[in-house]
Amino acid sequence: MLTPCEVAVKTVSPAIRALLAKTLLEQHHMRQVEVADTLGITQSAISKYFKNIRGTTIPIDQVPEVQTLVGQMANILVLPPTQASQQLELMRLFCQVCTQIRRNGLMCPLCQQNMKVKIDDCTFCQNNGCASPLVS
């Protein structure tokens, strides 16, 4: 049995990184090597995200709230890192994206597979979401 947070680590985090990488490539016109350096991952991973080979388990790119939050994250990442508050804001936004994905029920089918719980019986993510104090 995996908890919702464990499912999120395996599915939501890569989906967020993929959308963030695509946003940096397409909207901020960064090169794959620059995006890889910015995100602290390999250029190969960026290429796989861009080609939809990796980070596609959960379709988050059509959720307007997620697009807005990821756009805010990208805007912070293109700035020179000058303050610890930038890192805290990135963490807060990441948690908000994850919470939004969970509240929209996008993780429910994966949790059902991993927890053997009927979707109709589980409202954990929609009602509780992330209990992190970073989420406002």
Image: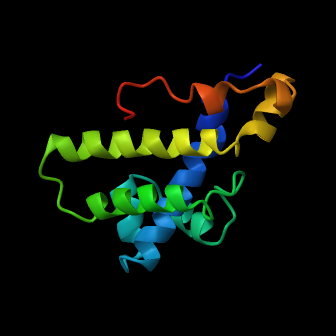
Residue 115 in sight here: yes
Q: Name the residue located 47 percent from the left edge and 58 percent from the top edge.
A: 42
Instruction: Give the percent coordinates (x, y) of residue 132.
Output: 42, 25
Q: Name the residue located 51 percent from the left edge and 54 percent from the top edge.
A: 17
What quarter of the picture does the C terminus occupy? top left
The correct choice, above or below, for 121 with respect to 87 in the image is above
Q: Image quarter for residue 47?
A: bottom right
Answer with left or right where residue 45 lies relative to residue 27.
right
**Residue positioned most to the top:** 1
Residue closest to the eye, 107 or 57: 107
The correct choice, above or below, for 129 with respect to 69 in the image is above
Residue closest to the eye, 21 or 42: 21
Instruction: Give the percent coordinates (x, y) of residue 92.
Output: 35, 39
**Residue positioned most to the left:** 82
Q: Name the residue located 47 percent from the left edge and 64 percent from the top edge.
A: 21
Q: Image quarter for residue 104?
A: top right
What quarter of the picture does the N terminus occupy? top right
Instruction: Give the percent coordinates (x, y) of residue 45.
Output: 55, 60
Q: Name the residue located 67 percent from the left edge and 24 percent from the top edge.
A: 124
The correct choice, above or below, for 109 with respect to 41 in the image is above
Answer with left or right where residue 78 lies relative to residue 51.
left
Answer with left or right where residue 60 lies relative to residue 71.
right
Residue closest to the eye, 127 or 115: 127
Specify the color scheme: rainbow
Instruction: Give the percent coordinates (x, y) of residue 87.
Output: 26, 43
Residue 32 in sight here: no
The correct choice, above or below, for 99 with respect to 74 in the image is above
